[in-house]
Amino acid sequence: VTLDPRDWSAFRKLAHEALDEAIDYVEHIRERPVWQPIPDELRAAFRSAPLPAEPTPLADVYAEFRTTILPYATGNVHPRFYGWVHGGGTASGIVADLLTSAMNANVGGRDHAAVEIEREVLRWCYGLFGFPAEASGLLVTGTSLANALGIAVARGATGGTERRAVYAAETAHNSIDKALRLCGYPPGTLRRIPVDAHDRINLDALDAQIAIDRAAGVVPAVIVASAGTVDAGAFDDLNALADRRDRYNMWLHVDGAFGALVILAPTLRDRLAGIERVDSLAFDFHKWLHVPYDAGALLVRDGAKHRAAFATAASYLKSTARGIAGGAPWFTDFGIDLSRGFRALKVWFALKEFGTRQIGDLIAENCAQAARLGERIAASAICELSLPVQLNIVCFRYRPAGLSGPQLDELNEAIALDLAESGFAVVSTTSVAGRRVLRVNLTNHRTTDADLNETFDAMCAAGARLSGAPL
Ligand SMILES: Cc1ncc(COP(=O)(O)O)c(C=O)c1O
């Protein structure tokens, strides 16, 4: 008995049908609702179905997937999905994922092509960001984990966690808080520094906090810069932060989850000035490179420090000078996973098939779309921009006269919920200056200007319907 199909030709037929279905899904995504709620009975069934002890024919499992799972996706493949910071994937990502599963490579170590492809992808990234040949890196699930691993390297390089201070903008992502917790920094280690008028770390406030810490005998250890904050799309001044890093012998880590890839857009890349000076960088491929979930990366300028944070000896993992156990150092020595999937293949496919120039143009186009939507909102009598549009994110409020602050909060939240429930588009919400606002994020290569205009019209129509304001 093996788990392979008994009837390969029947399996082949079903697999081809599934591939056709996957392609149809992406090709005809516009014809579907962006999102729809999971029906109550289906959710109840998900939550009560017993663990299958006996086999089910693959055709039945597949049929169940088609009717109960596929229709209730997040929606981020759709051109009118603007929630949070999701990438939309690509049709050819299906091919890369299929082949990845067929190879079933374990990229924790040993000597095989998948390891070399991950190294190749990383080498391309070192070049992009001006990292030296001694740099190291690792593909991971996403920027949250890459931030945690980067902070772990920083911890080792800056002498541990006790009486240490870590600095980040007040608007830095919550994965930084998680990273510090995971790395054992005591509560209160993170100093959230106020931002300036452009939502960047206020350098005077940073200097003042560093002075306070030093006077109190606390060692300034790590600065976490943001390259693309989640609400404003702001970039910290990396050169100014690298100067402080040099002055106080700190570690400079950058969270560039989506913003790092603006390096590919000639009109935007100056926002990353100084990136070649940072110690570590976390960013995603599943956002603006559009590879299917999940794929992010950590790059570390000094590969020896990176390895020192994670490498441990184990007799059963000893590498050899030749043969399948060769190829050291292994990726397992640069992170916490021993078994690791072949994420690099879909990234390699995407970089080769699309090329960095086209990806850069699409990034610039998303930012231009955000700017145009910002202009429409600025010209609207009933909406107001909540933050200047700096990159690809538009935060605004629908604001009819006569409603109190809390009523406006509720109204804007309701607009986002109604829009998603209508199936027409998905936007998210966030808080700006303590007020709930609508948030439109563009990391979507399928969105057209017509999509964006119709989405704005739909939000205004929902606002008018919910508040009784004139359209
Ligand atoms: C600025 C920023 N940092 C970190 C993250 C976390 O990245 P991931 O979702 O890939 O873990 C995000 C996600 O959107 C982000 O926008």
Image (tube, rainbow, N blue to C red):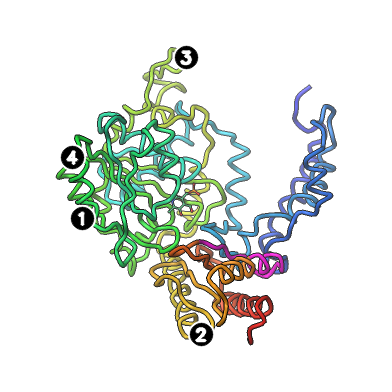
Q: Which of disc 4 and disc 3 is earlier in sequence?
A: 4
Q: Secondary structure at mark 4?
A: helix
C-alpha separation, residue under disc 2 versus residue under disc 4 = 49 Å
Give the mark, 1 or 2, whose residue is nearer the N terminus.
1
Q: Is residue 445 left or right of residue 164?
A: right
Q: Nearer the viewer, mark 2 or mark 3?
A: 2
The three-letter amino acid code for the residue at tag 2 is Ser
Residue on which disc 4 sits: 214
Q: Toward the viewer: 89 or 194?
A: 194
Residue tagged 2: 380
Q: Quadrant of the N terminus?
A: top right
Residue 297, how many percent across, how many down? 42, 44
Q: Image quadrant of residue 91? A: bottom right
Give the x, y percent position of residue 125: 36, 48
For discs 1 and 3, the disc positioned in front in the rendered view = 1
Residue 418 sits inside the magenta stretch: yes
Q: Is residue 392 located in the magenta-colored stretch of the structure?
A: no
Q: Which mark is residue 54?
A: none
Kindly report the distance in space between the C-alpha atoms of the residues bearing marks 1 and 3.
46 Å
Q: Secondary structure at mark 2?
A: loop
Q: Nearer the viewer, residue 458 or 90?
A: 458
In the rendered structure, find residue 240 and report the number of the disc placed on it: 1
Label 1 CB-ligand 1 distance < 8 A: no
State the extent of the magenta-drawn residues as a range. Answer: 417-430
Which SS class for mark 1? helix
Q: CA distance from mark 2 to mark 3?
A: 66 Å
- The circle drawn on residue 316 is 3
